Amino acid sequence: MALARIPAHDPRGRLDVPAFKAGITGTVIRPLDDTYESARLVHNAAFDRRPALVVRPANAADVARTVIFARDAGLELAVRGGGHSLAGHGTTDGGIVLDMGAMKGLHIDADRRLAWAQPGLTAGEYTAAVAAHGLATPFGDTGSVGISGLTLGGGIGWLVRKYGLTIDALVSVDVVTADGRLLTASTTEHPDLFWAVRGGGGNFGVVTRFQFRLYPVDTILGGAIFLPPTREVLRGIVPIAASAPEELSIIAFLMPAPPAPFVPAEHHGKLALALMFVYAGDVADGQRAIAPFRALAAPMAEFVAPMPYAGIYELTKAGEERGASTHRSLFLDALEDAAIETILERMAAPSSPDAMTQIRVLGGAMSAVPSSATAFAHRDAAVMVTLITPFEDLTEASVHVSWTHAYYEALRPRAVGVYANFLEDEGEGRIREAYPGLTYQRLAEVKRRYDPTNVFQLNQNIRPSVEA
């Protein structure tokens, strides 16, 4: 299906923004507009860029018009969902930001367990809406993250061991491609494109609607257990979590204990292993599943309770606050003693008092899908470690980047790949670690078919293959 197309613009001439704006149902924001300063911001304050225009489309036709306008004008196009891109891909200097945040439509068919969602929704908004029906789609670990970028990169979250990645719940997508077409991609329509968008990021177009499966998730057992950060505790968490029922998904944070009401004052600010979890099943079974973690060491503090599934996002509210940070991430086959020593050594002398190391134990439903079935190629990864270094003083950014990178380099010899959504701007080699071998080759071929001139390049970019 072809959508409205504007006449080609001569890049040597002056942009005819008024004519473009007149054809947009949504909002076009320019640098002199009152809302520009807030409209240009993204979640990571380390990225301070000034786009020429911020476009907030109301529908797919607005999206197509913006894509064509940016392409014909030779302007860099940044597509923004929730604005949480670790690489700052939701903004641009001098280009156009296509901010999907106003497109928040959601239709729920509880009987068929399907939902149709527009890309401006956040994980928290979507989850709260479908929770009214006792249902859920697996998203990430923070409620303010947009569903679009999270889904297109794969989607690793609180239900990963029970229901898999977000892309495993994806039934179809509506996509505006680089030539202004609106296509529906699924296993039966444009299956090559559907394969690619399930893990390949925003390389192939702008998704204007997702169709997701819904799964029965109502009351869960959730919360956090704070354990002392010892070698014995770190050795124990992966084998316990990996052998637990698939209803249990954990995310552990080696971090300073927060001044939460349930944390005794004497532990505030002290390094702890915060074991956060969701047990998506019977509450009594959940208590039995987490008992082995308590047996590793006497907890420093804990908050464990039955709660609505959406309640888990309340425990990660701090991650929604805008601020500057730098990151590195990697998959591991196991958390070996050498890696544990590195983690403890580095976290004993961080560059930032807020630095944390995140450890996710994977497997379960995520690993049940063949690696070749989607563009997410690391189905067999057992553990994901992510280094997160928040900081306040932007003039000291290089110090924190250097510390985080050195920490990563110390762990890197054990790496077996990386999650595309947790990459910063780290170069072609790291992109190929996210999409190894034949996966990258296949993505490049799909890229050539749907975006041969690489209009969509503000992402973990897959360059179009050269036709033989």
Image: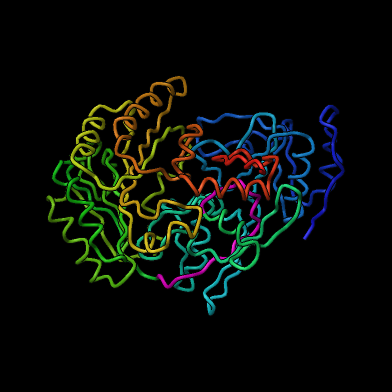
> Where residue 43 sits in the image (x, y, percent)?
52, 39
> Please, which residue is most extreme toward the bottom here?
111
Residue 171 counted in the magenta span? no
Query: Total of numbered circles in the picture?
Result: 0
> Please, which residue is most extreme toward the top here?
395
Snapshot quadrant of residue 341 = top left
Task: Name the side, left or right, on which 347 lies relative to 141.
Answer: left
Can see residue 369? yes
- The residue shown at (22%, 41%) is 272
Q: In the depicted view, which residue is nearer to us: 245 or 462?
A: 462
Residue 203 counted in the magenta span? yes
> Where residue 46 sits in the image (x, y, percent)?
50, 30
> Where residue 400 sits in the image (x, y, percent)?
38, 25
Q: Quadrant of the C terminus?
A: top right
Q: In the depicted view, which residue is nearer to us: 12 or 145?
A: 12
Task: Name the side, left or right, on which 414 lies relative to 369.
Answer: left
Q: Quadrant of the N terminus?
A: bottom right
Task: Name the side, left or right, on which 261 lies relative to 144.
Answer: left
Can see residue 122? no
- The residue shown at (42%, 73%) is 216
- The residue shown at (26%, 66%) is 245
> Where residue 369 sits in the image (x, y, percent)?
42, 63
- The residue shown at (20%, 40%) is 267
Look at the picture and state if 41 lies above or below 157: above
- Magenta segment range? 199-217
Q: Coloring scheme of the render?
A: rainbow
